[in-house]
Image: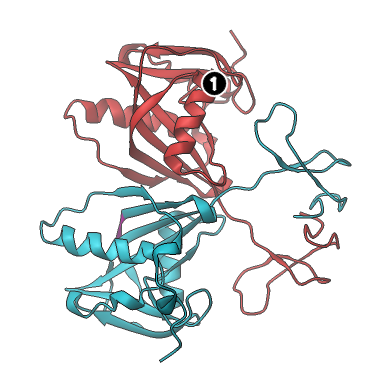
Chain colours: A cyan, B red
Amino acid sequence: MKFCSQCGHPVNWQTPSGDHRPRFVCPACHTVHYQNPRIVAGCLPLWGEQVLLCRRAIEPRRGLWTLPGGFMENNETMEQAAARETLEEACAQVEGLELYTLFDLPHIHQVHVFFRARMVDANFAVGEESLEVQLFHEAEIPWPELAFPTVGHTLEYFFKDRLHQLYPVRNEPLAPLSAIPITSLNKPDR
Amino acid sequence: MKFCSQCGHPVNWQTPSGDHRPRFVCPACHTVHYQNPRIVAGCLPLWGEQVLLCRRAIEPRRGLWTLPGGFMENNETMEQAAARETLEEACAQVEGLELYTLFDLPHIHQVHVFFRARMVDANFAVGEESLEVQLFHEAEIPWPELAFPTVGHTLEYFFKDRLHQLYPVRNEPLAPLSAIPITSLNKPDR
């Protein structure tokens, strides 16, 4: 941020009076511009024993597999955001959404939230942001080709929890991506 | 938003190409300015049978009682935000935070998240944004003087769940405040 979005004047990076941390502050109109983490909401769409994954057509992680999800918009709930993204990316309708995993990613100012969800029917198709959409049994999951750690963790928890049919809601922080081999991040399209 | 925060040019309200909804878009540098819901994180601080509440010293809802909480900041987790707000508003240290309630408030572009938390000791004090801080037994909760519906719902769930010592994580949407009597919203300081 370089300019005040209210008056167009260049902003300063300073700690407002009565605050504890630096913000972008406009010296002309005195607006304080707060910046906060964003929520990425997604689904774990289930069809019988199978899970629906999308191969990404866009960056970041183009060509890798993900659960359908994306940035939550104003004027919607997390559940609505997750269902909307599933419709947009996988052309799949879901119901019975249950909150399942919440990952804090403080280094990128995001919280990733996934819902378990039943597919309404077996219909799905390639959405605008996907190269492929496909149902996978547990043994078929392309683990080395998953786009995001939060997707991998959600799938791991799900297959473990499914053994006992108990799905506790989980919230945990995730560290930066440095542990992921660069070869899988840069994998070209197949 | 009236001006582009990247280049200072006046922005337009239009649907970017490839998008489905209108955004603030800069016609000069082509930056799309996304606006997303914000997370308010708070604690239900517990000391034995008692719950710690704060009487708000700031608007909105000045003079009414709340669980300590506030906007999640960049570079922190939801749990860290909840603990920080508890320290700032009630000068109380908490541990053993467990995710408990998540309320979607789509009409104000917020998600409120509360954690159950044990107070480390019986120390608490009036923080900068509080007029009073006090421990309450269930029978003493000032129900008509609670600042926010999400606080009331969290307390109601807690006292109900405590009977069975089972605290499932809950996620639900909340409607606008119109159902709340205006007398309690405008209650003056005591």
Does A108 sit above or below residue A155?
above
Residue placed furthest toward the left: A164
Residue A61, percent from left and from top: 47, 76
Q: Which residue is drawn at 42% across and 22% down?
A: B93
Residue A176 visible in image = yes
Determine crowd level at label 1: few under 14, some 14-19, many 20+ residues with C-alpha closer than 10 A: some
Does B190 sit above or below residue A140?
above
Residue A116, percent from left and from top: 29, 61
Assess whether residue B130 is covered by the magenta stretch.
Answer: no
Which amino acid lies under the numbered mark 1 shown in the image of this protein? Ser
For the image, the number of numbered tags is 1
Q: In which quarter of the image is residue B51?
A: top left
Say left or right for A131 vs A3: left
Q: Nearer the viewer, residue B23 or B77?
A: B77
Per the picture, the main secondary structure of the magenta-coloured stretch is strand
Residue B149, percent from left and from top: 46, 32
Magenta-colored span: A95-99
Assess whether residue A98 is covered by the magenta stretch.
Answer: yes
Residue A123 visible in image = no
Say left or right for A24 vs A88: right
Q: Which residue is drawn at 48% across and 22% down?
A: B146
Q: Residue at x 46, y 58 (%)?
A: A176
Which residue is labeled 1 in the image?
B184
Quadrant occupied by the N terminus of chain B: bottom right
Say left or right for B172 vs B160: right
Quadrant occupied by the C terminus of chain B: top right
Subunit of label 1: B
Element under disc 1: helix
Q: Nearer the viewer, residue A95 or B90?
A: B90
Residue B6, percent from left and from top: 78, 61
Does B106 sit above or below residue A184?
above
